Amino acid sequence: MSKFVDRYNLWTGDQRRQADALAKRLASSEFDVVRFAWPDQHGILRGKTLVAGEAIGALAEGVNLTSTLLAKDTSHKTVFPVFSAGGGFGIPGLQGGADFTIVADPATFKSLPWAPRSGWVLCDAYMADGAPCPYATRQILQRAVRELDALGLELIAGLEVEFHVFKLDDARMHPSQSGQPGEPPQVSLLSHGYQYLTEMRYDRVDAVMELLRANLTQLGLPLRSLEIEFGPSQFELTFSPTAGVLPADTMVLLRSAIKQICQRNGYHATFMCRPRIPNVMSSGWHLHQSLRRRSDGVNAFIPEQPGADLSPTGLHYLGGLKEHACGAAAFASPTINGYRRYRPFSLAPDRATWARDNRGAMLRVLGGHGQSATRIENRVGEPTANPYLYLASQLYSGLDGLRRQLDPGPSVDAPYETPAAQLPLSLQEALHCLREDAVLVEAIGRDVVDYYCHIKEAEIARFNLEVSEWEHREYFDVF
């Protein structure tokens, strides 16, 4: 009988050749196990680990996962009635926790440097009939990339990612501390804050930086710089620009890799935007993006005239990012906590503006005439964002700008004072803006948007049921 991949013709010719080469490596006893990883709706990696002999067949046959994974919120609670018709999604084939199949993309295969003799491969999700899983976010970005390709352009994106690394003092593993979610670990600082980019602060955490550098480099990620950020125990890594889906693949692997590397060495890494730790600073994910012409490989954002900020293509794309900033916010900042970051004069944007090299604006334009690195930096995102949905929302926003030849208006000099559309102040508001954005809803898909909002609204409902420490402190004594 034919394998799942052959039955539904799921690989390109290049992928078949890559899979054949990978199967030979697995047969040579180079690896003991292979992790088949799939990025879920939150951009969290899930999957199964197979011994090498079984992994060879699973390359073409796929690996089955339960469809309840599609129904999870960030606490891993199931928020859809999976035993109702259509599994709560209204989709035949998903009822009763039925299986879906993840298929390896052999081009993504890695040897994990921190886990000896362990391979890793990123997978795409398919239904039992070979159709793409409608909620598989990597395939949503792949679709957006294909639409851009039809215009003779490809996305080029570079990552600038902030996060925290703490010393792990207590993992909170007493049975009473378990839960859904369990109690967060107890941690202490690796460094005090507020000495942004100082060499002394860097040297103090050099052992951790070297640990990350060595492993991420061995992993093949395009690491450029390791930096001390402003807050206590806060770091920043930047990565060279790559094309198409690869920037999102890099981000999803990066987060998982850093957390695993740190955990194995007595540290706790978190990409949570604003941890509840004294004196902490918020972390952002700044996404640098441009478009490259396929015809000649030239950056399509470079202006032809000296003194211009961007080419007409770049300006229209910028206009689309600005036009859909509020609608795309739920993908750029998908957690309740992420909206703690949007504060005036905080180097995080609070309204949809653009400016020439101004870190207070949401969209910061860099480069110019004769500069190959001309690009737009979107400063709105938080590092927890599902990278596939974040990048897809950027592409679909920019594509709308190109098609409608949107004008972004003039650059602003005072981004916290210039009248402009205010960015959502909460996740609930962001979800409303997303639902009201007809262009993004059509591009991403109404069913996907409804699905995504349902999961996020379940998280908000759980949050609203909790009595916060602020409420107790504010009202318990005074009334």
Image: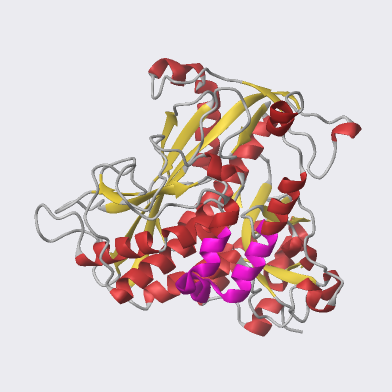
**Outermost residue to the left:** 306
Location of residue 23 with respect to 172 vertically, above or below: below
Does the magenta segment cover residue 116? Answer: no
Q: Where is residue 327 in the image (x, y as percent from the top left)?
A: 48, 62
**Outermost residue to the right:** 175
Q: With 192 as the anchor, is 351 left or right in this view?
A: left
Location of residue 114 with respect to 463 vertically, above or below: above
Residue located at (62% from left, 26% from top): 277
Q: Give the range drawn in magenta.
A: 431-456
The rendered magenta stretch, by its main secondary structure, is classed as helix
Q: Where is residue 186 in the image (x, y as percent from the top left)?
A: 72, 25
Residue 177 in view of the camera = yes
Q: Position of residue 428 (x, y in %)?
A: 60, 55
Place residue 24 in its image quadrant: bottom right
Residue located at (52% from left, 17% from top): 192
Residue located at (18% from left, 52% from top): 368
**Which residue occupies the foreground of this view, 408 or 108?**
408
Question: Which quadrant holds the N terminus?
Answer: bottom right
